[in-house]
Amino acid sequence: MCRKLALAGCILFLSSFSSAQFSPREKTPLAPSGALTMDDLLTAAKHYFRDTAELPMVQTTTFSVTDSSGRRSKPKVQTTSYLFQGYSRQANGPQVNIRGHVSMWAMLHGSKMIWVSANNALWTSIPGLALYAKPDTYKFQVRAIGEDLATATYTPIRGCSFSMNERNSRWYFPDDLCGPSEFQLTKDLAFQEFSYEASGLPAPVKMDPFGRCTLRRYHADVSFQSVDLPGEKDPFLVPKEVTATLETDKGTIVISSFL
């Protein structure tokens, strides 16, 4: 996947959402008899990654830092209410809406953990972007894992450079998504996990708490769970766990979220 992001987001500071019913995956699209194709993934995506209903969720995000000597600082935790809105092809971008309780002092100084929470909330929308990337911008490859699992990988055709917004060192999301994206699926085309590996590294960046440093690796993982909503005939997928790992010459940052 290789594309410039146009982020449509809303970060608020109040919360009051209801819950949805989570259930095992059912009524999944049937797997093809032959090799997995791009059309098969798009068929499954239309079934699972729908934007016909909004789902209120609670996201608990942990920000962990380990310096180059291996010493780990005390993790910071932020709980936010998160309105998952799926991905709309018409909007041509991810939709992120999170709400969290922070102090007035933190609001005035720009709450770091709200930015960190938004980072992982944004990652939950990226699988849809990867699936609908233009076919002429990547190579598509399928690999079987045993009898029940397979991976589908999108690899950019052109070379990539890496950058992150230096005007806000509390923002840990790449300016461009340019790197291999991979989906893990069951044999009945149920999406299990999504992963992204940034290309164009190492690269100089500026981010808290390291300041200016060299980013050596950027990796993100998203796992899915199935939900049922009133008025929806079929279950669809929402994020379950998100982890972004940033490895630098000064240490490693891990941002993990559970929903």
Image (tube, rainbow, N blue to C red):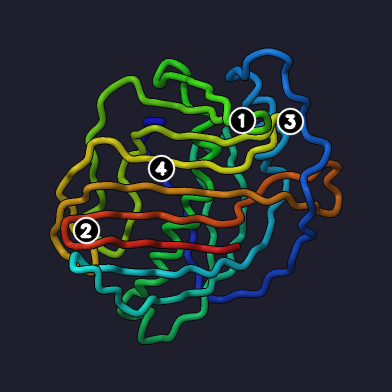
* C-alpha gap between disc 3 and disc 4: 33 Å
How packed mark 2 is, by other alpha carbons closer than 10 Å (few <14, some 14-19, many 20 or more), is few
Q: What element carries label 1?
A: loop
State whether residue 166 is above or below residue 236. Answer: below
Which residue lies under the disc numbered 2? 167
Contact (Cβ within 8 Å) of mark 2 with mark 4: no
* Nearest to N terminus: mark 2 or mark 1: 1
192 to the left or right of 126: right
Q: Nearer the viewer, residue 87 or 130?
A: 130
**Residue 188 percent across, percent down from the top left:** 73, 30
Q: Nearer the viewer, residue 26 or 89?
A: 26
Name the residue rendered at 40%, 72% in the picture.
113
50 to the left or right of 213: right
Three-letter amino acid code of the residue under disc 3: Asp
* C-alpha gap between disc 2 and disc 3: 45 Å
Q: Quadrant of the N terminus?
A: top left
* Nearest to N terminus: mark 3 or mark 4: 4
Q: What element carries label 2?
A: loop
Which residue lies under the disc numbered 4? 6
41 to the left or right of 122: right
